[in-house]
Image (cartoon, rainbow, N blue to C red):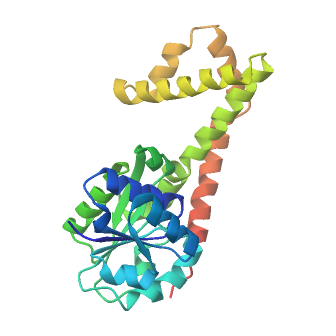
Amino acid sequence: MTRVAVIGAGVMGEALVSGLLRATWSSDDIVVADRRDFRRAEMAAAHGVRATGNAEAASEADTVILVVKPQDVGAVLPEIASVLKPGTLVVSLCAGVTTAQLESHLPDGTAVVRVMPNTPALVGEGMAAVSAGTSASEADVAHAMELMTALGKAITVPEAYQDAVTAISGSGPAYLFFVVEAMIDAGVMLGLPRDISAALVKQTVFGSAKLLIESGQHPTVLREQVTSPGGTTAAALRQLEDHRVKAAFITAMEAARDRSRELAPPAG
């Protein structure tokens, strides 16, 4: 088993550690680094892993996973670049940061793989998109996929797709939670107690997602199965179309894609 260093102990960093421990990694296989002393202490207490500084963690690892904010990448890379062992794989979960930008700050030939995960990884149902850098081998990509499937599902994509992936699945849970909020509030406005409205909406969303996945049907077909001519669903959908909800979603995701591009640190 390779030794993994997780640099960054935020929500996604902790989700990754938890997922690896649920899979085939032991606490001895994982070292965590974070600039905050209290987070290192919390990670060690909660998960039984060793927690230390960035350089020390990176120097011990065969795989270094960067789980820091895009704006912090520029500070972290110089700390780890000089201590990486030959053959170390660097896996980046940093939104908007390209493999070329990472490679330019790491020793020549360092294998880099870029990943966009999402927060359902917290419950083992994440979706991750994996892209190889110029020096990453098929084995490196396979190892990154193995890491990510500890958190849910993963696919490989060309790196040119990563900003769109960020807009769709990376930010996607927030859009769905926004819709859930709106549906619960609508139930309250229609006279339902909030707890009943919330129970109805949550199970409806969960069941609909399961039906979509397990049936293999196109969402249009499933929507039409619910929509009787002249019925209640048709009346509701008419309002959504009148308010251009689909167009608003597309525009929102374009904005997310554009912001993903802007978050990348300057080249050089």
Q: x, y (%) of residue 3?
A: 27, 71
* Left or right: where 179 falls relative to 188: left
| Quadrant in which residue 193 is drawn | top right
Q: Nearer the viewer, residue 52 or 219?
A: 52
Q: Is residue 199 above or below residue 65?
A: above
State the residue at coordinates (72%, 24%): 194
216 shown above or below 29: above
Residue at horizontal 27%, vertical 59%?
A: 25
Q: Position of residue 89 (x, y in %)?
A: 29, 75
Q: Is residue 182 left or right of residue 18?
A: right
Question: Residue 104: in sight, yes or no?
Answer: no
Picture quadrant of residue 91: bottom left
Q: Judge by depth and name the residue closer to the eye, 5 or 86.
A: 5
- For the point 55% across and 44% down, the residue is 173
Asked if 46 appears above or below 177 in the picture, the reply is: below
Count of number-bearing discs: 0
